[in-house]
Image: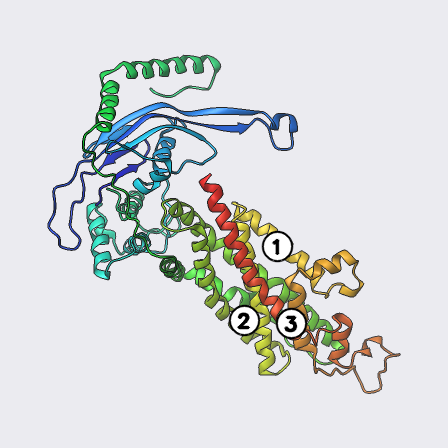
């Protein structure tokens, strides 16, 4: 399908260089393929680690160096397949990582890489080689055809719909995937295509980027380690004295000194722009979610299910103070402020990690940057969250008998949409820092609980809190959301207090006859801050999105190191 050398790992690892393009996608006459050669000369790679944990100052200052590759040379020409044999941990994948520009910058790489006799700089490796990873990271709810089409759209800037269609059909035909083109990729729980077909889909995704496609040490005992290490050294020494090794080195030197060197066949640099990639990623993420019926139902109905439990428990609020008119309303608002961020967190923890894994892999292939996948996910979240909040609000607001005014219903819905989004976006930021979703789940839950306790004013009046907690409350979105909901529900309400002859002296609860009294006691001045509170509450959303982009840019940088 292309002209670049392609690296294909397996249990043992195969290395193949294509002879050139096998078919013409636009009907141009086929030309004779140009031969290519790949040479690796004296490649070595080592990494350094600190001896002890960071808290042990003495051992932390010492480092030990581990040699992973040592003086490796190879030479392969168009049409040849090379098998790299070795036990687990022997450096097979590291060798391919070194050639394809995937090595972390913290290690020390020495050696030379030649394509067609021309030496490549380290920053050119990724532009010249495609690499199919040992694990297949694919979106389970897309078909084979859709998976490859989106990859082509991300990799190639220009082309008509028929061009992309022909390109995808050609690579599927070459890898015998045409018969499963419209089947879902699937996973262990969903079924789908076979493991071998998934492997070929991963290879096909790399081909669409137009690339031009007895030996172990036994460490069970010190004696066996010494014995087997000597055997490996003997094999290595014998190989270096062999005719094959001498011929490999001669071929590399010969290609370096050819009078006319063929051009290095780099990948196409004509990739789509930022907004085009974002559009493709958004469509891919949305289609993958829509195919997952359970995920769609979870997104749309989990807030409603949470509200139904509350609805069946309270049934309907009343205006009689002695029958819980104020207490019931406070409990309902407290539950809503505390639960909506948590349901947003559940969405991100369940749906985003697989997209994060895909972006980690595809960004290393240079298809896009990790933050673009994050932004595509954020954009796809918005309409689902709006619909889910409207469904939840429409049922709960009117059934519970909250303030009977359409405008108040709108404010109520808008006030609860924000914490739902904030909970999900905060989770995305943490997923960019913390790899384990279970830990993120716990962290977001604790932050949400702390925010409600300190910021809402429902458990303890903020005015009576110690000054440090007062200051912290201004940095919690729950403070602004709670004040909005309290004003929205209590402003303009008039309460009764049992029979007409009950007085404040008879029952202190009868002191509250108007909702404005409760507002001024709980959050003084909140009525005048209603609009400002909305602005501050919704400012958390772009702030978290920007923070997420920064975090994923840093993640991109750290993974590349």
Q: Secondary structure at mark 1?
A: helix
How many marks on residues? 3
Whole-percent x, y for residue 426 in the image: 56, 56
Residue reaching furthest to the front: 259
Nearest the camera: 238 or 417? 238
Q: Is residue 490 left or right of residue 82?
A: right
Please name the residue that numbered disc 1 is placed on: 445
Please name the residue that numbered disc 2 is placed on: 392
Sort mark 1 into few (<14), some (14-19) or many (20+) by Cα contacts within 10 Å. many
Whole-percent x, y for residue 168 in the image: 24, 53
Query: Residue 314 falls in which quadrant of the image?
Result: bottom right
Task: Work out whether mark 3 precedes mark 2 in sequence or the reverse, and give the earlier one.
Answer: 2
Residue shown at the point (86%, 82%) measured from the top left: 503
Whole-percent x, y for residue 207 in the image: 26, 45
Tell me, yes or no, if residue 260 can be seen here.
yes
Q: CA distance from mark 3 to mark 1?
A: 27 Å
Residue shown at the point (50%, 69%) measured from the top left: 386
Nearest the camera: 351 or 104? 104
Tell me, yes or no, if residue 85 can be seen here.
no
Please name the residue that numbered disc 3 is placed on: 532
């Amino acid at each position: 399908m292309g002209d670049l050398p392609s690296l294909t790992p397996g249990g043992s690892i195969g290395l193949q260089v294509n002879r050139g393009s096998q078919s013409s996608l636009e009907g141009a006459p086929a030309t004779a393929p140009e031969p290519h050669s790949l040479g690796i000369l004296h490649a070595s790679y080592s990494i350094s680690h600190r001896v002890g944990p960071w808290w042990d100052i003495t051992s932390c200052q010492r480092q030990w160096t581990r040699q992973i590759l040592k003086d490796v040379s190879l030479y392969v020409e168009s049409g040849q397949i090379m098998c790299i044999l070795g036990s687990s941990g022997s450096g097979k994948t590291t060798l391919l990582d070194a050639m394809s520009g995937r090595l972390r910058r913290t290690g020390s790489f020495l050696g030379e890489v030649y394509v067609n006799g021309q030496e490549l700089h380290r920053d050119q490796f990724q532009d010249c080689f495609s690499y199919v990873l040992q694990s297949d990271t694919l979106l389970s709810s897309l078909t084979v055809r859709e998976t490859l089409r989106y990859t082509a759209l991300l990799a190639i800037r220009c082309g008509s719909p028929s061009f992309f269609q022909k390109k995808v059909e050609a690579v599927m035909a070459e890898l015998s995937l045409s018969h499963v083109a419209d089947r879902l990729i699937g996973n262990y729980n969903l079924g789908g295509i076979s493991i071998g077909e998934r492997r070929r889909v991963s290879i096909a995704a790399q081909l669409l980027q137009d690339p031009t496609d007895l030996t172990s040490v036994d460490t069970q005992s010190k004696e066996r380690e010494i014995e087997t290490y000597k055997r490996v050294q003997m094999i290595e020494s014998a190989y270096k004295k062999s005719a094959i090794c001498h011929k490999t080195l001669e071929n590399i030197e010969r290609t370096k000194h050819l009078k006319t060197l063929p051009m290095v066949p780099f990948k196409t640099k004509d990739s789509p722009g930022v907004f085009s990639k974002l559009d493709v990623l958004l469509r891919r993420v949305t289609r993958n979610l829509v195919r997952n019926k359970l995920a769609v139902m979870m997104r749309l109905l989990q807030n409603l299910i949470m509200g139904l439990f509350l609805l069946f428990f309270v049934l309907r609020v009343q205006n009689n103070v002695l029958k819980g008119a104020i207490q019931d309303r406070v409990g309902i608002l407290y539950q809503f402020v505390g639960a909506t961020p948590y349901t947003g967190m559940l969405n991100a923890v369940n749906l985003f990690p697989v997209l994060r894994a895909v972006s980690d892999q595809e960004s290393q292939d240079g298809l896009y940057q990790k933050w673009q996948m994050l932004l595509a996910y954020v954009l796809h979240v918005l309409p689902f969250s709006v619909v889910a909040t409207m469904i939840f609000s429409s049922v709960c607001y009117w059934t519970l008998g909250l303030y009977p005014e359409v405008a108040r219903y709108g404010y109520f819905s808008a006030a609860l949409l924000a914490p739902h989004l904030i909970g999900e976006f905060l989770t995305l930021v943490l997923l960019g820092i913390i790899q384990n979703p279970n830990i993120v789940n716990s962290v977001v839950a604790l932050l949400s609980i702390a925010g409600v306790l300190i910021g809402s004013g429902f458990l303890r009046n903020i005015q009576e809190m110690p000054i440090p907690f007062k200051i912290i409350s201004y940095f919690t979105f729950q403070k602004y959301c709670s004040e909005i909901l309290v004003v929205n529900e209590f402003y303009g309400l008039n309460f009764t207090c049992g029979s007409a002859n009950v007085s404040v002296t008879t029952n202190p609860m009868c002191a509250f006859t108007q909702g404005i009294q409760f507002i001024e006691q709980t959050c003084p001045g909140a009525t005048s801050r209603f609009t400002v509170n909305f602005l501050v509450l919704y400012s958390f959303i772009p702030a978290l999105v920007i923070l997420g982009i920064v975090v994923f840019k840093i993640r991109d940088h750290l993974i590349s190191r």
